[in-house]
Amino acid sequence: MLPDWIPNIHPFVVHFPIALLVIAVLFDLARLWFREQSWLQNAVITLYTLGTVGLIAAFLSGRQAVETVSVTGDAVPVVTSHEDWALYTLIFFGIFTAIRLWTWWKELEKGWVLPALIVPALIGTGMLWYTGEQGAKLVYKHGVAVGEIDRLGQQIEELEQRLAGFREEAGPEMRDDGSWIWRIGAGADQVITESFSTEGVETVDASTGRDDGRIHLELSATDEKAFLYTEGDLSAVDGRAEVNLTDFNGEFLLIHHFTDSESYQYIRISGSELQQGQIVNGSDNVLGAGRVETGGWTTFRVTASGQHFYGYQNGNTIVHTHADEMEEGRTGFAFTGSGNIKIRLIEFTAL
């Protein structure tokens, strides 16, 4: 059983393969001067084998770990880089260790062969170092999986919600890099078609209401899918929406990399399921799905960085998927169905 202050086993696992493989390379270098010491050769092969097996455990536990921690938007590119380089390093040492086992079995590590084998070993050590550096950056720069940072983040989020009533705006606040945030305020229903481009519908039936002291936008859904989006093109993005879908029956989507209704990426909430996928040439490719709770006010979030995509509800990872990166595009939301959607906030940030 893990202590309740540790969200996953990755910190327990990851240091062993690093130590084993670094010691293996050091022993390899020592063999250049002590070639007659057979125990050194046996130790090197054992260390490379155990280290590579440890890398498999570290990689798999890391894939699981990212689904148990809260990752801020600016940390997402570091997470994806860390995961990518972990995979590259695992593949590299998997192939390299297989070669070393073969040369050891065939007794080929003589003459120039041993120095030649040490060169890729040093390259692998560099890959290991860079992968570890990305992991350290997640913890020490971005505070990922640090309990106190998570608590501070929750307090900041609560404070943001309390201050939202003083910063409500009719239309979205646009930024120079294509990012935008819309804290729903009085008059939001009057400017929605001025603030967003639309596709699929000519008009949007909207009104405003107040719940728990905060103004929200209320949209009436129809059978036609309505797309609302801003004009700035983004590539890596972090988007979120605070919504209430209690009185809604249909599909609500956060969309990004949007070119038109035939080409975009999304998280889609339909009933008690959150799906993540891509629409390519009109074809719907669902990459992953998970169950969510849609009663009352809830925050859905999507991030996309490179070939890594995440979908969250209230800070909890629901889906983590991979696919080819789509061409940069616009961001926004879409919906179809019946009933009413209530929205307090929508935001998309360039990463």
Image (cartoon, rainbow, N blue to C red):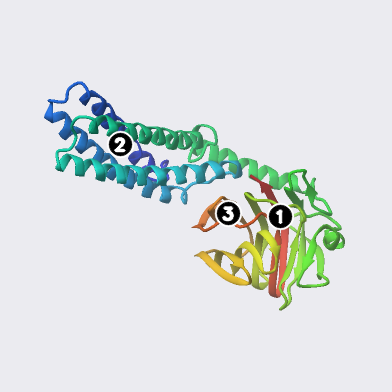
Q: Looking at the rendering, which quadrant does residue 201 occupy? A: bottom right
Q: Is residue 132 above or below residue 350?
A: above
Q: Is residue 174 above or below residue 292?
A: above
For residue 2, say whether it is visible: no
Q: Quadrant of the C terminus?
A: top right
Front of the two marks 2 and 3: 2
User: Who is closer to the viewer here, 263 or 147?
Assistant: 263
Q: Which residue bears the numbered disc 3?
A: 314
Secondary structure, mark 3, is loop
Circle 3 crowding by C-alpha within 10 Å: few under 14, some 14–19, many from 20: some
Check whether the beta carbons of the residues at disc 1 and disc 2 lie within 8 A of each other. Answer: no
- CA gap, disc 1 to disc 2? 43 Å
Q: Can you tell which mark lies on residue 16?
A: 2
Q: Residue at x 82, y 54 (%)?
A: 171
Q: Residue at x 25, y 45 (%)?
A: 98
Mark with earlier residue (1, 2): 2
Identity, as a three-letter code, of the amino acid under mark 1: Ile
